[in-house]
Amino acid sequence: MLTKIAGGDIIDPVNGRLGKGDLWIRDDMLVGAPAGASADRTIDAAGCIVMAGAIDIHSHIGGGNVNTARLLLPEQHAAHQARPAATPLSNAGWSTFQTGCLYAKMGFTTVVEPAMSPGAALHTHLELADIPIIDKATLAILGNDDFLLSMIRDDASSQMIEDYVAWTVASTRALGVKVINAGAAAAFKENVRTFSLDDVVPSYGVSSRKIVKTLQAAVDSLGVPHPLHVHCNNLGSPGSADTAASTMAAAEGLPLHLAHLQFYGYGTEGKRKFSSAAARLAELVNTTPEVTIDIGQVMFGQTVTISSDVMRQFSARGSASPKKSVIHDGDGNGGGIVPYNYGKDFYGTMQWAIGLELFLLIDDPWRVFFTTDHPNGAPFTTYPALFELLMSREARTEMTAGLSKSAMALSTLAAIDREYTFEEIAIMTRAAPAKLLGLTDRGHLGAGAIADIAIYRRCGNIAKMLGQAAYVFKDGDLVVQDGEITHYRWGKALRLNPSPDKAMVRRLEDYHQQRYGLSLDWFNFPDSAIAREQPFGEVACRT
Amino acid sequence: MAVAWIGNRETLVERAAAHAAALLGSSRCPVFSLDTDIHGTRAAIALAERVGAAYDHADGAALSRETALFTDKGAMTVAPGETRRRADVVVIVGELPQIYHEFVGELAETVPDLSAKNQREFFLVGPNGASAPPLSNGRTGTLLSCGEASLGSTLAALRAQYRGRQTSQPVSNFDDFAKALAAARFPVFLFSGDATEGLALEMLQGLIADLNRTSRASGLHLPASENGWGSALASTWMTGFPLRTGFARGFPDFDPWRYDVARMIAAGEADLHLRISSSIVPPQKKRNRMALIALAKTQKPVAGAAVTIAIGEAGVDHEAVVYSSRTGSLRSVDARAASELPSAATIIRLVASHISAEVALPC
């Protein structure tokens, strides 16, 4: 089938296309204008902005901890529209089905779940497989697991460590590797309550820095396209900007991605000893080209924090709203679920402003990524409002009027004039994420890309425009029309598939038998366990 | 071999499925009770949405106590692997289902390799005369009891004594327990909703929270039913809610009282019962002429069922994904004795295919 998207304002920074033009889709791929051919279907995109489908690199959309959060908070998702849906289960609040629909309506076509516990890989992929329409991917968590910490303690060769990382990525069907408060979950099991970059995990004698550096080197050496994805130590603490700065300095020329930097943008100034360090961190990002970051923007209202940083979540239990939480000591990281309501008080305002400062003070849209760390800073459904704040100084000023004046006095936000352009939005949410994840087939509108396309009808209201796409194509299939889902299709989970080293597999088999009394078979699974046709799509490692 | 019946009359699976679909389509209050694997659950929930049914686990009461702990209170939990490798004190809270006796025995036969202590002590919380699962080498767990007091009361007394408060009746062997806790690095409490009341589960979590003020401790959840907990997880990601959810209003509605399927049947609210279980379950007493559709591993029609369709057992007749309390997560299992018997999911989808709709089911 040949489809023509006619007369839209095309924004495709990768291919240098900015301006009115046509796009052509043959089946599931974008193609050049075919000579003399007539389209089977024409979409009139006059008055519309046409971009590639958006990619979210860090959103907790599925897996054990996310599901526990659903279980913990039935009252938060009970009230939903009681109307019949054309698409099954899509009006089930906070379900996998609704997740896919809500993302697609905004023009997002690929989303990365950034925290998959390797032992719960099957559970995670089953949830992702029930998220319709969009493609998904996951990052496997390492860095608090006994096997890795023991290898580092015992000075295992870098080859052995790479073999272990490769086996983990391959067996869990991950697209990359994440380390979350490296060493802290292991230390917490031994009753350590705070943990910084140069602190040492008891019983292993290994520092958090050493874990991060070891994994960073392994990921780079294996050719995993996405740099090591780091959740730093001391998340949420006043003074955590020092930790983030130290971690950035530890990149030492090799690629490193720091997740949800907003949660580390905290200084210790002012009478509350809580201030914005965003300008300092932004400057560091600007001058450290090997570092990429995503924001983890806070937006006001009720949410739930879901994190495999079990030490941090344990310490946050007292702020739970409503007053209930789950803390789980897992085989590696475990995790914590703490509901939270971001109010417009001093602290909430400070966090909100710090996120925006980071967005606006980091110069290069190729190295700053658009996230709320869903749902930790805010649910992803706040994205349209966040786009508006980034693209309109006036919207920021209006919002600021109702916020804490004492917090704003400690922030540079009011003095920042920058407004994101559509081209910068297209880089930050399309081109750059595809590059960061090694997904050459998306994030742009050139011939040969998969036909993931978001078309937005221009209007004065940015949030409305970007919140309800006029049309969305996923793999050439028109799945959204006038902001509504037309039908389901089933996307893939994108994964790497490095060949596991046989000696490492034998070693892991012995390890599991001896330490857990279980064969490795208990943790492996065939693709058929997912019960969808072609549940995975393979992405190549760098050669 | 016969695999499908309408009443007592043998028929083709296709016809039985069509008849089941017709019954579901004409029911005003269908209810499902599940004891099945993950994909059976997914298919059942998709069908429940289509026909406006409520669904519950076959032993809904025990599962409901466990889900209520999470929906109402929250918890501190630990993975089974960490329990084996780290727990230097193991406290068995009340009676555990038989299926966990082997794991408790395994804990008794091993030492925690990630703990400096390299040994385990065992305690049992329960009334006088309570017995723990057999430990190896003739070892026994030290009993912590308040005479004939309930488990909840005993846990309350234990918690109070730990905080240095007075109790009307002291817990037996408390000094031994306090001494063990003082030396412990990672005590773990084994609990299940099988025979433990909801308030006792909450009290246990209160004790664990108290212990974590200054040291570490956690609870290992050993679900009353592994299938039940697996279904609860799948239901939660599919609808946002655990079992005891209904689609009577066209969208998922979680109400642990209203959608207690056993209650709905006993009260005469349900007019159609779809029971999905590889095992044969005796029919429940009912007040009305409720029809039964039974999907079961059977070679003959289920007594009283309007439709019976034979299904295989997950992990025996066909490969499956199930919850494993040994790993604390979902697990893929091969067929131990592969047979021609179809999975529950296959039959449910076949039934659903006979219910007219514009769009396909998502599972």
Image (spheres, coloured by chain):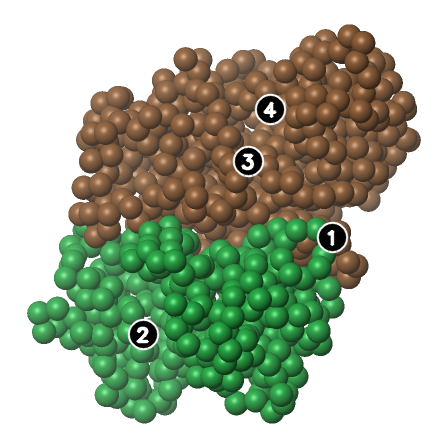
Chain colours: A brown, B green
Mark 1 vs mark 4: same chain? no
According to the picture, the residue beneath numbered tag 2 turns out to be B96
User: Is A522 placed left or right of A440 in the picture?
Assistant: left
Q: Position of residue A216 (x, y in %)?
A: 39, 23
The chain identifier of the residue carrying mark 1 reads B
Mark 1 vs mark 3, CA separation in Å: 24 Å
Q: Residues within 10 Å of mark 1 (few under 14, many from 20)?
A: few
Given this view, does label 2 or label 3 mark the residue nearer the observer? 3
Mark 2 vs mark 3: same chain? no
Depth check, front residue: A62 or A535: A535
The chain identifier of the residue carrying mark 4 reads A
Name the residue type under label 1: Glu
Q: Which numbered disc covers residue A492?
A: 3
**Residue visible at 55% across and 35% down?**
A492
Q: Position of residue B157 (x, y in %)?
A: 36, 81
Name the residue type under label 2: Leu
According to the picture, the residue beneath numbered tag 4 turns out to be A433
Q: Position of residue A211 (x, y in %)?
A: 34, 30
Q: Residues within 10 Å of mark 4 (few under 14, many from 20)?
A: many
Mark 2 vs mark 4, CA separation in Å: 49 Å
Name the residue type under label 4: Pro
Q: Quadrant of residue B104?
A: bottom left
Mark 1 vs mark 4, CA separation in Å: 37 Å
Q: Secondary structure beneath disc 3?
A: loop
**Residue visible at 48% across and 62% down?**
B344
The chain identifier of the residue carrying mark 2 reads B
According to the picture, the residue beneath numbered tag 1 turns out to be B358
Q: Position of residue A437 (x, y in %)?
A: 53, 24
Name the residue type under label 3: Lys
Q: Secondary structure beneath disc 1?
A: loop
